[in-house]
Amino acid sequence: MTLPEDPWPAPTATGPLDATVDVPGSKSLTNRYLLLAALAAAPTELVRPLHSRDSELMVGALRALGATVEEDGEDLRVTPGPLRGPAQVDCGLAGTVMRFVPALAVLADGDVHLDGDPRARERPMGPVVRGLRDLGAAVDAATNADGEPTLPLTVHGTGALTGGAVDVDASGSSQFVSALLLAAPGYEQGVDLRHTGATLPSLPHIDMTVAVLRERGVTVEELTEVGAPAGATTEWAPTRWRVHPGPVAGGRIVVEPDLSNAGPFLAAALAAGGTVRVPRWPGSTTQAGDGLRELLAAMGAEVVLADGALRVTGPADGRIQGLDADLHDVGELTPTIAALCALAETPSRLRGVAHLRGHETDRLAAIVTEITRLGGRARETADGVEIEPAPLRGGVVESYHDHRMATFGAILGLRVPGVRVVDVATTAKTLPDFPGMWRAMLAGRG
Ligand SMILES: O=C(O)C1=C[C@@H](OP(=O)(O)O)[C@@H](O)[C@H](O)C1
Ligand SMILES: C=C(OP(=O)(O)O)C(=O)O
């Protein structure tokens, strides 16, 4: 793979697409399965996992803590070992590594030091650090100007943790909840976690955590605290989770494709016209990316899930409808949807995603800045963005080390000649060869 030109000239579509795009394994599933494999009582074989920067960082963390991870072609085999310290863990910019690994590291028999990219030191960590301390762990962490714990941090592992009841404000990220639940089977009393914040983003990602724990034989109860603010759109939304201590099973797991990473390719069918198919689309899943089916249909696409593949066809007249939607359940889709909103015929209002300010970059600011830079009209609101129809012109789109801002630029480039994306290589966070896949999609090969 050659390094892409920087800034990368985003290709403009010359006609309707007709492509099949096989997307690699889910980041969120791969990193959950990997973490649980290190806690398991027997080896785990991951079939078609993701191989990208975020998954490599998780593999590196587990190896540092004593697990053996072997590659078998595309597959991975994890053999758990006694969790050990001292260890150094590079979190890069991976939320799943910086939040999930400290919860595992408390079970190592020594100090585990975690750090990451400069931006990783700015991403919220407080609820995980406080939660682990409340459960009996000793954690030293840097603090930011607001006195909130951040990376770098050191977990002083003692080989065991009492666990038990803990209150966590997860309004900043669902990963605070997922982190403590995933490691909880290894704690003496498990974890009884109550969410105390006013809103709860990305509930499907917590559902995913519960699902993978149950798949691995762990008992998890989902409860609702009477009077607690659920902050979720689903009719019944848990605000309390009880994970019982006990063994985690090993075994063979086939990883679903990453449906959020399918997003830019499916969005391309609306931006460029034509049809894009994604094979191996699961009939039922906890991935937030499944929400694309409803969102893209609301924007004017024909969306058909049949014979195990998702097929998205853009509107024949090329007119994309704007969207008024609360995206708090599916926040990681926001940059992809925002790119389509910037190409839409009618105004859009994307709501419920204030927590995106703590993602790879402040995504609300980034979306508004980059749409404005290309001559579009967008503004930030307290919990999202508003985008008005306006003609766009070419220009250089910043990606801010954010894979989803880089693909945001690529989507715009399909319709707007002269878009160049800074550091498109940052897409390697969750996709190994985005520029190559994008070119192949445009050539209709997929
Ligand atoms: O647990 C996970 O795998 C993720 C949870 C979500 O985080 P937030 O709740 O911080 O949005 C999501 O946006 C992120 O891409 C992956
Ligand atoms: C928010 C994201 O990533 P992370 O897992 O680093 O939080 C994302 O992939 O959109």
Image: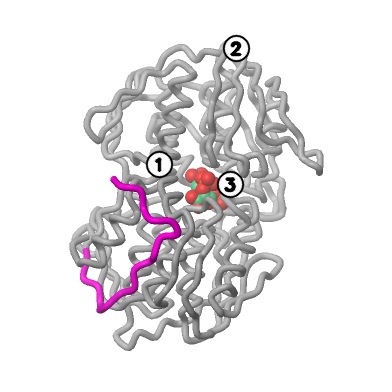
What is the total number of numbered labels drawn onto the structure image? Answer: 3
Tell me, what colour scheme is on the image?
one colour
Per the image, the residue denoted by label 1 is 29
Q: Is residue 380 left or right of residue 93?
A: right
Task: Look at the picture and state if 251 lies above or below 226.
Answer: above
In the image, 228 versus 282, the foreground residue is: 282
Give the residue drawn at x 58%, y 35%.
Answer: 116
Determine the CA span between mark 2 and mark 1: 28 Å
Q: Image quadrant of residue 316?
A: bottom left
Q: Position of residue 350 (x, y in %)?
A: 58, 70
Q: Quadrant of the N terminus?
A: top left
> Label 3 sits on what residue type?
Ser
Res 206 visible: no
Q: Is residue 398 above or below residue 51?
A: below
In the shown orientation, is residue 334 left or right of residue 143?
left
Pair 2/1: label in front = 2
- Bin the neighbour count of mark 2 within 10 Å (Cα to Cα): few under 14, some 14-19, many 20 and up: some
Dominant SS type (magenta): loop
Quarter holding residue 31: top left
How far across and how far down the image is residue 40, in percent? 41, 22
* Residues rendered magenta in the picture: 1-19
Name the residue located 46 percent from the left edge and 12 percent from the top edge.
82
Chain-order first, disc 2 or disc 3: 2
SS at badge 2: loop
Q: Nearer the viewer, mark 2 or mark 3?
A: 2
The numbered disc on residue 102 is none
Task: Give residue 227's position: percent from left, percent from top.
Answer: 72, 53
Task: Classify mark 3 as within 8 Å of ligand 1 or not, answering yes or no.
Answer: yes
Task: Return the residue at label 3.
Answer: 174
Give the labeled residue for mark 2: 110
